[in-house]
Image (tube, coloured by chain):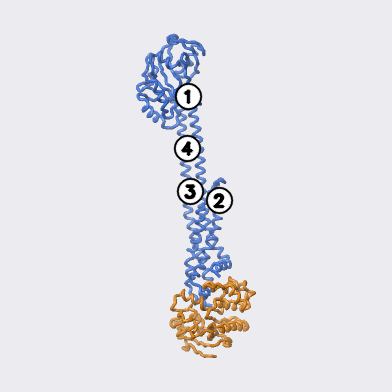
Chain colours: A orange, B blue
Amino acid sequence: MNSMLDLQDLTKTYAGPNGAVPALLRFSLTVQPGEFVSVQGPSGCGKTSLLLAAGGLLQPDSGRVVVDGVELYALSAAARARVRATKIGFVFQQFHLIPYLSVLDNVLCPSLAADLPDAPAQARGLLDRFGLSHRLHHVPAQLSTGERQRTALARALLHSPRLLLADEPTGNLDSDNGAAVLAHLASYAQNGGAVLLVTHDPRVAEYASRTVRMITANKELQQKAGPQ
Amino acid sequence: MTVTRLIWREMWHRKLSFALGAVSVAVAVGVLVAQVALLKKHDLRTEQLLAEKEADTKTRLQKYEDDVRKITVKMGFNILILPKDQALADLHDEDKLARTMPEDYAAKLARTRVATINHVLPTLTRKIKWPERERKVILMGVKGEVYLQSASQKPILEAVAPGQMVVGSELHRSLSLKTGQPLRFMGRDFKISKLMEERGSSEDITLWINLNEAQELLQAPGVINAILALECNCSPDRLAKIREEISALLPDTRVIEFASQALGRAEARNRAAQQAAEELQQEREGRAHLRAQRESFAAVLTPAVFLASGVWIALLTWVNVRDRRTEIGVLRALGVRSSQVLLIFVGKAALMGLVGAVVGEGVGLLCGGFAGEPLPQRLQMGVLCRETLLLVLAAAPILTVVASWIPALLATQQDPALVLQEE
């Protein structure tokens, strides 16, 4: 079976005031369809860089990122945007909902980038599934943090991406809300989607099919991987 | 979700920022429209003033002309056509028939209707001793006027029927003559048909008889020695023209114009016409000068306001881009293309331009309508220049797009990874 996400020898270094700061060092990982992979590590170990590189938003210094058989960084920026618009969903720790749009409009945002004829019905269905039917016309400021994250999750799933990239999605949530979001992600993976989630929350392991532990690159031990 | 909806929602969310941008466009457009309206108003007012002045001048000149005509008619004939070698001083020489010309010259002149000649009267004149009364008189043989310009005109000098005589003032007073009284002259009997009033001229010692009888008495058949005519003094350079035309028509003649009060009036009319033309020209030049001043002011003010508005729009867009960095990053993460991000910002700027243009046009027209010179109600609609308004409506969004282009372009080049890592 073709892997959904294939990261090969990713290296990314940032320029810092005291010289180069490595974020990723020869990092490799494969995520299969239906797999929920959790990448765990302390803050600053390069988790977010990994996720952005996997989503075609951060070009690594070296290495390859292959999404559903397409090597992302061999494409133009516009073509990468098309891949994101059709195959990848993002969930962020800070939710990043657009403050002036209603819950429904926020969820509909991916339809700006891709032609989604059933988007309104799909959005309502997702929001109903996430228990937000009564919040359709509320703006993010009127939502609880859990509701915001569920809205962000619904937005990430609107275009039925094959790969979901989640950056600390439970970081700002209490345990109940965190558990609800993780359950949704697990359910999404069970239905054939691939999930790559980066977190320092150990509870995620309970929902993930596989956990990858990252250590900081500058200690020359980039990765240790293995099933839980 | 569409870009339009996103723009609309964002605009509604940041109302103040949008309003500040739209107001700056409205100010620029308002200044432009008001300036155009004021200049248009100035032009209309100028046209109105000049038309009024022209009409007034025309009326005055017509009145002058009318006066001159009336006076001219009142004064009697003012043109004398003589045989070429006939000196005016010798015309009434005693016992000597002056030089003559064919009688049909008068008919010829009347038929040809030279220049503004009117009331053509052929005469045969001679100073002669009235043998029956032993005194000097001027005998003038006259026929009826051979040409009148219109049927309503009355002849200046009535025709004298054969056997009748018209007597000058000095003669009838000194001789106590009465109308209807028989009178013998050079052995022929006449009947006095009219007694003339005092004129203070040689006419006071003149006897008028029928031309044919005068020709018989003076033994000068078929000739005359003067043609009297009336010329209306209608144009300043008329005498040269009359002379030119008459000399072409009647060879061996000369034209003499009697100095008269009419000439003075005609001169006054000509001076008035000249003065009126000068006043009109001064008014025209004054208005043109004022317009040039207003145009210069508009030429400085309008671009300055537009430039300031452009800078302000650019600044507002830049602030908007900075405030929406995360939103841009998220949209890019969702697969929104950079061209769409550009469209989000320039679309908003275009909308700002359109709203500002509509408001600015309204305010500009109001200001332009109320400011400056008053204009009659019927001319006020003329201030509206539909083409300019449409052009401004089309151009304002384009200019705001141009002003916001660089900040919008910066938004498209923003690295979403940097923004998303910052959070």
Three-letter code, disc 2: Gly
First in sequence, mark 4 or 1: give its number.
1
Mark 2 and mark 4: span between their CA atoms?
A: 31 Å
First in sequence, mark 3 or 4: give its number.
4
Both labels 4 and 1 in a single chain: yes
Q: Residues within 10 Å of mark 3 (few under 14, many from 20)?
A: some
Query: Is A104 on the left-hand or right-hand side of B35?
Result: right
Q: How many marks?
A: 4
Residue behind mark 1? B75
For residue B291, which numbered disc appears in the image?
A: 3
First in sequence, mark 2 or 4: give its number.
4
First in sequence, mark 2 or 1: give its number.
1
Q: Marks 4 and 3: in contact by CB < 8 Å?
A: no
Where does residue B245 sit, x and y in percent of width and height? Answer: 38, 29
- Helix or strand or loop: what does disc 1 sit on? helix
- Helix or strand or loop: what does disc 4 sit on? helix
First in sequence, mark 3 or 2: give its number.
3
Mark 2 and mark 1: span between their CA atoms?
A: 56 Å
Q: Check the residue under mark 2 and report the chain it is in.
A: B
Residue behind mark 2? B369
